[in-house]
């Protein structure tokens, strides 16, 4: 993604703002993704860069219908339209709301300590353990250490620090984070665009924070999962699941989309840390198009107990009370959620 480096250095870094042409130049094809996150300011640019000019030209605003860029050395002026000198700022609150949504955090966005830093929400495990997320903008080592010091004073709990990049890393910061048992996530490493104005995590959050959760969650919760942010009132018919690979799934519940992993869904073997039998059964059901028939070679009486455990895990993860897998024709199992499996008919 080109957005994150553009926010750290270059013409947009100061105030996360610039004229439309600068945003387009810095972001390229990402412009359309970022545009919904921008807001127009009342102030106009004092200078603009035109064409191949080595230096920005001074903007003279006589009136809204008479704006020019002046080349003092050449003694010429270039007429400009007002929209060419309107400054657009990236709305930090809107961006951070998109970040929190991509991570599946709970709670409302809250700026603290004069907007340095911001509370993004909480990462909630299926067993109820909660870890706060904080965003800090610090662009240099000293500022970031100061921001993390503010966070450390605000919460006694282990927390997750979120920054645009790791460019402000320092030994002092490592000591401060290590002393509080905190985790550090860089947006440029873990997020990508899903659509215009919407971000998504490259990997499940539980996988990104596996070491952090293992260190701070109780023994009974070491393999616990984060609960899916299921919209209120959703039923199993609103759930669509597609296999991404052997370790992760693409899930859509009434427009809330995530890529999730077996550990996040509570289907990790506590001894081997590999996918457990319930995960294998879930993949089998998806591979069969959501219907596992009695005569299927993979079906056996031993699957009954695994099916019951799988149903319990799915209910806990999605927060939907009804049975996710139902018995039909006395012996066949059918998923009550939609599956997308290539080469199989439902």
Image (cartoon, rainbow, N blue to C red):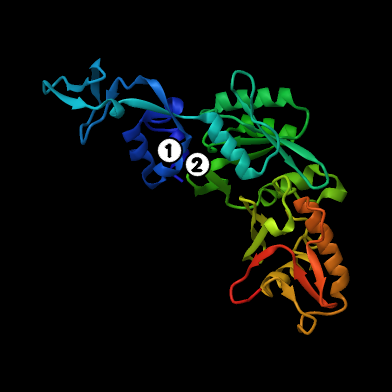
Q: Is residue 75 left or right of residue 15?
A: left
Q: Which residue is mark 2?
A: 197
Q: Is residue 151 left or right of residue 309?
A: left
Question: Quadrant of the rendered structure where residue 53 is?
Answer: top left
Q: Is residue 304 left or right of residue 90?
A: right
Q: Which residue is mark 1?
A: 35
Residue 138 in the image: x percent, y percent? 55, 28
Specify few, some or many for label 1: CA neighbours under 10 Å numbering under 14, 14-19, or 20 or more: some
Q: CA distance from mark 2 to mark 1?
A: 7 Å
Question: Quadrant of the rendered structure where residue 305 is?
Answer: bottom right
Question: Residue pushed farthest left?
Answer: 75
Earlier in the chain: of badge 2 and badge 1, it is 1
Question: Residue pushed farthest top?
Answer: 62
Mark 1 element type:
helix
221 in relation to 249, above or below = above
Please give the name of the residue rendered at 58% of the width and 52% of the height, measured from the top-left corner.
202
Out of 244 and 150, give the one closest to the viewer: 244
Residue 260 in the image: x percent, y percent? 67, 55
Q: Is residue 242 visible?
A: yes
Q: Are marks 2 and 1 in contact (CB under 8 Å)?
A: yes
Residue 80 in the image: x percent, y percent? 22, 26
Label placed on residue 216 = none
């Amino acid at each position: 993604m080109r957005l994150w480096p553009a926010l750290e250095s270059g013409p947009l870094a100061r105030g996360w703002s610039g004229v439309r042409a600068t945003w387009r130049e810095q972001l390229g094809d990402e412009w359309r993704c970022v545009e919904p996150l921008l807001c127009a300011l009342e102030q106009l640019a004092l200078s603009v860069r035109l064409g191949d000019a080595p230096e920005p030209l001074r903007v003279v605003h006589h009136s809204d219908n008479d704006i020019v860029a002046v080349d003092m050395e050449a003694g010429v002026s270039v007429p400009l339209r007002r929209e060419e000198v309107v400054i657009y700022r990236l709305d930090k609150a809107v961006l951070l709301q998109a970040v929190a949504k991509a991570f599946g955090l709970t709670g409302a966005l809250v700026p603290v300590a004069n907007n340095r830093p911001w509370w993004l929400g909480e990462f909630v495990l299926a067993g109820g353990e909660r870890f706060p997320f904080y965003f800090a903008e610090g662009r240099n080592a000293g500022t970031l250490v100061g921001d993390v010091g503010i966070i450390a004073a605000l919460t006694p709990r282990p927390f997750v620090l979120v920054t645009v990049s790791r460019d402000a890393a320092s030994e002092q910061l490592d000591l401060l984070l290590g002393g509080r048992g905190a985790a550090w996530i860089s947006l440029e490493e873990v997020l990508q665009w899903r659509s215009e104005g919407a971000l998504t995590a490259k990997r499940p959050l539980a996988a990104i924070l596996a070491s952090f959760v293992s260190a701070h969650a109780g023994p009974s919760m070491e393999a616990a999962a984060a609960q899916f942010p299921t919209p209120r009132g959703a039923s199993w018919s609103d759930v669509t699941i597609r296999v991404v690979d052997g370790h992760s799934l693409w899930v859509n519940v009434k427009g809330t989309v995530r890529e999730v992993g077996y550990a996040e869904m509570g289907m990790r073997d506590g001894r081997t840390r590999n996918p457990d039998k319930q995960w294998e059964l879930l993949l089998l059901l998806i591979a069969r198009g959501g219907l596992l028939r009695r005569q299927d070679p993979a079906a056996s009486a031993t699957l009954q107990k695994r099916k019951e455990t799988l149903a319990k895990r799915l209910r806990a993860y999605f927060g939907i009370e009804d049975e996710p897998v139902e018995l039909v024709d006395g012996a066949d199992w059918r998923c009550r959620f939609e599956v997308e499996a290539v080469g199989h008919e439902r």
